[in-house]
Image: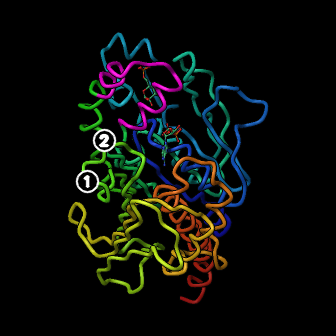
Amino acid sequence: RCSAEESKTVVIGLAADSGCGKSTFMRRLTSVFGGAAEPPKGGNPDSNTLISDTTTVICLDDYHSLDRTGRKEKGVTALDPKANNFDLMYEQVKALKDGISVEKPIYNHVSGLLDPPELIKPPKILVIEGLHPMYDSRVRDLLDFSIYLDISNEVKFAWKIQRDMAERGHSLESIKASIEARKPDFDAYIDPQKQYADAVIEVLPTQLIPGDNGGKVLRVKLVMKEGVKFFSPVYLFDEGSTISWIPCGRKLTCSYPGIKFFYGPDTYFGHEVSVLEMDGQFDRLDELIYVESHLSNISTKFYGEVTQQMLKHSDFPGSNNGTGFFQTIVGLKIRDLYEQIITSKAAAPLEAAKA
Ligand code: ADP
Ligand code: G6P
């Protein structure tokens, strides 16, 4: 009993629409856990899985029940639950959580077909990322922590234009059309999952430049649920108070339009939450230490760890603003949660023996 309990995998859910920064977030997260995750060696080169010493990240697209042709024939999108096998998703995540290996299907993003399955062994930390980690209540109940990346329409549009126009040669009209076509299913099946998330990273246009929708300067909100076991929200200066802070000045270099922080309590879908907000961007990443030193409960192991992580990955998108900053902090919070779960499990048999 004791060893079975100890071997249990901690399961984290990360939900977002595609093209919203999930892979970038995963790279920041696995770096905090102590090592970049890589595709399985010697397996299918089109595998969507990433593995490190501690962490396995699986992509929930692998549970598509309909392949690209099947979706076309039935007239459903990948976002539609009808195109996904939640029974299998539940069975396999549960098995992994119980320490049992599974043969997980692979959805091949190149061919649009389902490839032969790959063996997934139970890791210490399992991240399930994709469109529907919190959609099915059975899967949701298996999650030890859940995150929703909430990119506002304006910003999503700006990012998609940047990528699909510049890098893939799509036209503005076709990008608009593809976003519009996804919207009804996104609103029906993806967006509602945010009410279940323990942490939400919301990405909005800046309020520092009136009327700006360019998606370059961003206002990012970290919404943290109160009362979640093993998770205590980050705070600025004084827990539970409401604070507006402009750190620019002698200790932090800011050019136009500057940086503005906000911290305070709020409610989110009827839950009590704490919100930390950052609008604007950093000019000099090494000065981030000044902001970091004013935050509490960030679960660092040494002074300046957030800044160190941000400097290490300064080439990742979002490194000069709240997206990268808050993703890094959420990574540290998850490491802390994992360590607390492991400690509490190790203590559990002792408690039982005492009783
Ligand atoms: P996903 O895995 O959800 O498809 P990625 O992490 O691959 O998303 O990011 C997709 C694209 O979105 C990136 O190439 C980049 O253009 C843009 N992007 C993602 N995160 C950010 C960010 N924080 N700031 C600016 N652009 C971003
Ligand atoms: C979403 C899903 C992918 C899917 C893509 C396009 O982004 O995450 O799994 O491949 O939609 O779907 P399509 O039906 O156009 O191939």
**Residue on which disc 1 sits:** 210
Q: Which residues are magenta?
A: 157-179
Q: Which kind of residue does numbered mark 1 sit on?
A: Pro
The part of the image, by quadrant, that contains residue 80 is: top left
Disc nearest the viewer among 2 and 1: 1
Q: Secondary structure at mark 1?
A: loop
Q: Residue 313 versus residue 270: which sits nearer the camera?
A: 313
Is residue 242 toward the left or the right of residue 234 in the image?
left
Magenta part mainly helix, strand or loop? helix
Q: Which kind of residue does numbered mark 2 sit on?
A: Glu
Q: Secondary structure at mark 2?
A: helix
Q: Which of the two labelled residues, at mark 2 and mark 1, occupies the earlier sequence position?
A: 2
Seen at 43% across and 11% down, the residue is 69
Where residue 268 appears, as percent x and y from the top left, is 25, 63
Seen at 32% across and 59% down, the residue is 208
**Residue on which disc 2 sits:** 154
Q: How is the image coloured?
A: rainbow
Q: CA distance from mark 2 to mark 1?
A: 14 Å
